[in-house]
Image: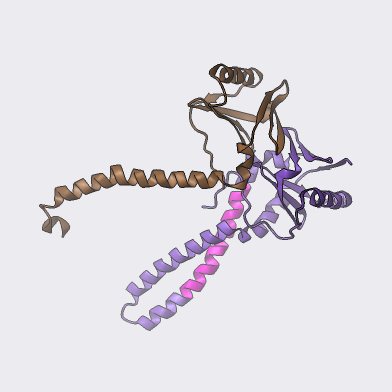
């Protein structure tokens, strides 16, 4: 049984995909919660000093400010994340994922071949499988995440077979949500 | 207030400040660094680093083989070599590190490896640690 898929990941589509789902990451959620608490404490102190004569008005202002900062923070952070991710994807680190790759499936392993490196993963090295939108995400125990784009309709049969084979050999389940502990190389959220 | 009321305590405050700066803070910081580094390397991503590895240099590039995966880097994928206390880090531009520990290699072997890599590519050897930071 030998199966060959050649594909190429489109950069702008890849960026949109990550921006759509990035707020389900646990680390980012924690960080935004932390920022929110800090901001609200600062507002709390400011309002208590400013309206120290009328505490009712101060309380109402605090509640409004808390709601506003919540929206403001998420909006602000969406833009920042997009800019930072674009900068990382344009750098050398992601050159390998955006180049033309040839995926070869044999009975023992998955082989990935690009211009810079060929990598052969045995079945024990795979620990996670995710399928969302147009991407199949395969995570391995080495420092490498395999993104297979399924936007090309000619490959759909091959990819469904690939998923079946992987599930057979490595006893994994196919998840249909975004992995909430994904790591980006060379990018920290703060 | 403090200065006015506590003129006799002033040298004691300075002494406490110095102790805090040069003894307590470095201790706490080094401990937190150790904990963080341990946390980093216990991630699932690094399981491949601590397997039994065979390292091959051929005409086309570098090859590493473990029980989990085989990786074959071509010469154009290599970026830099870091050599610290006899440990060798070979860095690729995809931010992957091939780590050769000093316990498993003799000094002549290390020199031979670096000479062979430099004969095929024109990358530099640095004597500082690489920034091993992963998001």
Can residue A143 be seen here? The reply is yes
- Locate the N terminus of chain B and report the quarter of the image it occupies: bottom left
**In the image, what residue occupies the spot 15% across and 50% down?**
B10
**In the image, what residue occupies the spot 34% across and 82% down?**
A54
Q: Position of residue A8 (x, y in %)?
A: 78, 43
Task: Identify by letter the chain in purple.
Answer: A
Q: Quadrant of residue A7?
A: top right
Residue A67 included in the magenta stretch of the image: yes
For chain B, what colour was chosen?
Answer: brown
| Above or below A118: residue A98 | below
Nearer-the-camera pick, B62 or A18? B62
Magenta stretch in the rendered image:
A64-87
**In the image, what residue occupies the spot 38% across and 83% down?**
A56
Give the left or right position of residue B43, taking residue A157 as reference.
left
Residue most toward the left? B8
Residue B33 included in the magenta stretch of the image: no
Can residue B95 be seen here? The reply is no
Q: Position of residue B44 (x, y in %)?
A: 62, 47
Nearer-the-camera pick, A42 or B94? B94
Q: Position of residue A80 (x, y in %)?
A: 56, 55
């Amino acid at each position: 049984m030998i199966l060959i898929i050649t594909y190429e990941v489109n950069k702008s589509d890849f960026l949109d995909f990550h921006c759509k789902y990035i707020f389900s990451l646990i680390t980012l959620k924690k960080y935004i919660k932390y920022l929110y608490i800090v901001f609200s404490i600062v507002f709390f102190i400011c309002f208590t000093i400013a309206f120290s004569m009328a505490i009712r008005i101060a309380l109402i202002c605090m509640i409004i400010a808390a709601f506003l900062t919540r929206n403001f923070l998420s909006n602000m952070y969406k833009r920042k994340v997009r800019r930072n991710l674009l900068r990382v994807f344009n750098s050398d680190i992601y050159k390998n994922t955006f180049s033309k790759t040839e995926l070869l499936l044999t009975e023992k392993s998955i082989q990935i071949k690009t211009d810079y490196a060929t990598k052969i993963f045995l079945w024990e090295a795979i620990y996670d499988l995710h399928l969302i939108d147009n991407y199949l995400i395969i995570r391995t125990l080495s420092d490498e995440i395999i993104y297979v784009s399924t936007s090309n309709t000619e490959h759909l049969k091959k990819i469904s077979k690939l998923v079946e084979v992987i599930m057979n050999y490595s006893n994994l389940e196919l998840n249909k949500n975004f992995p909430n502990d994904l790591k980006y190389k060379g990018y920290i959220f703060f | 207030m403090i200065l006015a009321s506590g003129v006799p305590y002033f040298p004691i405050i300075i002494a406490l400040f110095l102790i805090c700066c040069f003894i307590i803070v470095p201790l706490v910081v080094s401990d937190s660094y150790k904990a963080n580094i341990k946390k980093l390397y216990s991630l699932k991503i690094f399981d491949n680093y601590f397997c039994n590895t065979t390292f091959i240099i051929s005409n086309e590039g570098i090859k590493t083989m473990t029980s989990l995966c085989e990786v074959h880097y071509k010469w154009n994928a290599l970026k830099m070599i870091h050599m610290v206390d006899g440990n060798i880090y070979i860095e690729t531009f995809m931010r992957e590190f091939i780590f050769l520990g000093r316990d498993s290699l003799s000094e002549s072997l290390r020199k031979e490896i670096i000479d062979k890599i430099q004969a095929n590519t024109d990358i530099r050897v640095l004597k500082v640690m690489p920034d091993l930071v992963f998001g």
